[in-house]
């Protein structure tokens, strides 16, 4: 095993910048390269974060023999293709949520990772929040009894802009892909995979979903209620865990990045 894992970033956007700033805090992790379809953009990002190498194409970074793992922070519709290319090149991948834009795309990435024996993971950072980890430990230890219901809501305050990634269908916009993954992931973490999902909502003028209400039902009667809102501020991901009439509240979480 190498003394440090040498990382490359594909897609030098705002979220990637937040990740890059935290690399010095991560043991055995070295940020060695960044790639963009625009070389000047990659060079600017590399200069801002003291990254040794900048590439003007994703292919160049994936061909770099000194890169062990790749953090993929491109828009959602590009995740599948980039993840498959990285896995094919033998690079471990950490894919920004949403993992892919479609279920079939996610399954394809998973199948290739398993077939090649290469690590692949979605960057669902909320699973590692101390409040969520502590709540899961309480549930697993039986300290609060059997969880029968999970409730959560999540929203952001962002003005409508049809060119913005959140509102642009070509960039995988919409409340569910951008925010809904948090509340669905929370439900799966505590309750497992649901037997049925019911959803309703509304659309922005661009056609992407503006808001959604989700009800996840389980065969044993447990359920999970979620509200996802793109245009309005709401509480953080994860509000209540209910078990036979008692509420337990995880500590407040920071807003999503």
Image (cartoon, helix red, strand yellow):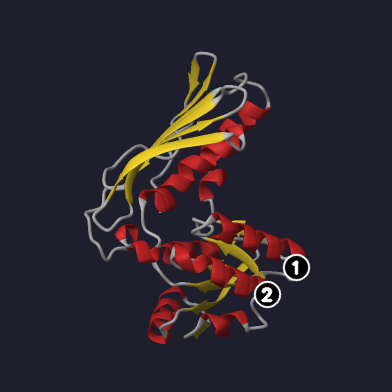
* 111 versus 227 height, above or below: below
> Along the horizontal axis of the image, is 154 left or right of 242?
left
Q: Quadrant of the N terminus?
A: bottom right
> Along the horizontal axis of the image, is 162 left or right of 120?
left
- Do labels 1 and 2 touch, CB within 8 Å? yes
Which residue position is annotated with label 2? 88
Judging depth in this view, the residue of 1 and 215 nearest the camera is: 215
Q: Earlier in the sequence, mark 1 or mark 2?
A: 2
Which residue corresponds to the image point at 63% horizontal and 83% vertical from the top-left? 64
Judging depth in this view, the residue of 230 and 92 nearest the camera is: 230
Q: Is residue 21 visible?
A: no
Disc 1: CA contacts within 10 A as few (<14), some (14-19) or many (>=20): few
**Kind of element beneath mark 1:** helix
Which residue position is annotated with label 1? 116
Q: Quadrant of the C terminus?
A: bottom left
Which residue corresponds to the image point at 46% horizontal and 72% vertical from the top-left? 11
* 91 versus 211 height, above or below: below
Give how far across and how far down residue 84 sits, in percent. Answer: 62, 70
* 225 versus 169 height, above or below: above
Give how far across and how far down residue 39 sits, in percent. Answer: 42, 86
Disc 2: CA contacts within 10 A as few (<14), some (14-19) or many (>=20): some
Which residue corresponds to the image point at 55% horizontal and 71% vertical from the top-left? 81
Q: Residue furthest top?
A: 245
**Kind of element beneath mark 2:** helix
């Amino acid at each position: 095993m190498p003394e440090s894992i040498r990382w490359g970033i594909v897609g030098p956007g705002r979220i990637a910048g937040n990740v890059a700033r935290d690399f010095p805090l991560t043991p055995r992790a070295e940020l060695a390269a960044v790639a963009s379809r625009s070389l000047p953009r990659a060079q600017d990002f590399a200069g801002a974060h003291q990254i040794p190498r900048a590439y003007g194409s994703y292919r160049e970074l994936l061909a770099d023999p000194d890169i062990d793992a790749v953090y993929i922070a491109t828009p959602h519709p590009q995740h599948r293709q980039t993840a498959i290319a990285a896995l094919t090149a033998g690079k471990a991948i950490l894919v920004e949520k949403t993992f892919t834009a479609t279920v079939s795309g996610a399954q394809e990435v998973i199948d290739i990772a398993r077939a090649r024996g290469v690590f692949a993971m979605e960057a669902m950072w909320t699973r590692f929040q101390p409040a969520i980890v502590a709540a899961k430990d309480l549930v697993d230890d039986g300290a609060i009894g059997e969880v029968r219901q999970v409730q959560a809501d999540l929203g952001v305050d962002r003005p409508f802009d049809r060119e913005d990634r959140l509102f642009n269908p070509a960039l995988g916009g919409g409340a569910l892909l951008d925010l809904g993954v948090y509340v669905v992931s929370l439900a799966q973490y505590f309750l497992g995979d649901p037997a049925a999902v019911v959803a309703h909502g509304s659309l922005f003028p661009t056609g992407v979903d503006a808001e959604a209400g989700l009800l996840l039902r389980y065969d044993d009667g447990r359920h999970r209620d979620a509200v996802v809102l793109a245009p309005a501020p709401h509480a953080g991901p994860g509000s209540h865990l209910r078990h036979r009439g008692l509420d337990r509240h995880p500590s407040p979480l920071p807003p999503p990045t």
